[in-house]
Image (cartoon, rainbow, N blue to C red):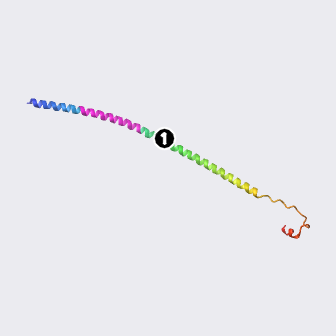
Amino acid sequence: MLSLEQVKLLESKVTQTINYVKKLSGENSQLKEKLHSSQKRNEELEALVRQFNENQSRIEDGILSALNRLNQFEDALESKLSTESKLSTESKLSNEIKPVEPVPQKDAAALPSSELDIF
């Protein structure tokens, strides 16, 4: 048979077990809340990373587009400067090279013999 002491000891152990289960249930609830909060924060961060990657791609595309336009502008400018330089050089050359004006014809008999040798 069970003695009174054994029943009291059993009751004490049951009470301790109930308190321990309540404590563990409370900790379990807190951990579930932390987990839920962490998962929510993780989803927010993943959304931010996706948005950052999308923005990064747009920024890179914008920079590449701007660089391409800058290259086109530079090429056009170089082409124009080259054309202007070529035209300027040709203009200088045409100004430096003047057409030879014909020497007025003199009567060959009137010219001394040394001038006749030139022609």
Residue 41: within the magenta? yes
Measuring from the top left, give residue 52's x and y in whole percent: 46, 41
Measuring from the top left, give residue 14's x and y in whole percent: 17, 31
Q: Quadrant of the N terminus?
A: top left
76 versus 105 height, above or below: above
Q: Is residue 91 left or right of residue 10?
A: right
Name the residue: 71% across, 55% down: 89
Secondary structure mainly formed by the magenta segment: helix
Q: Tag 1: Cα neighbours inside 10 Å, few (<14), some, or many (≥20)? A: few
Name the residue: 24% across, 33% down: 23
Name the residue: 73% across, 54% down: 91
The kind of secondary structure element at disc 1 is helix
Q: Is residue 111 left or right of residue 3?
A: right
Badge count: 1
Name the residue: 24% across, 31% down: 22
Measuring from the top left, give residue 68's x and y in whole percent: 57, 47
In depth, the one of 51 and 23 nearer the eye is 23
Look at the image and give the residue range highlighted in magenta.
22-45
Q: Is residue 63 left or right of residue 49?
A: right
Q: Quadrant of the C terminus?
A: bottom right
6 versus 88 height, above or below: above
Residue 29: within the magenta? yes
Residue at the farthest left position: 1
The amino acid type, in three-letter code, at marker 1 is Asn
Measuring from the top left, give residue 8's x and y in whole percent: 13, 30
Identify residue for label 1.
55
Among the 4 quarters of the image, the one containing residue 66? top right
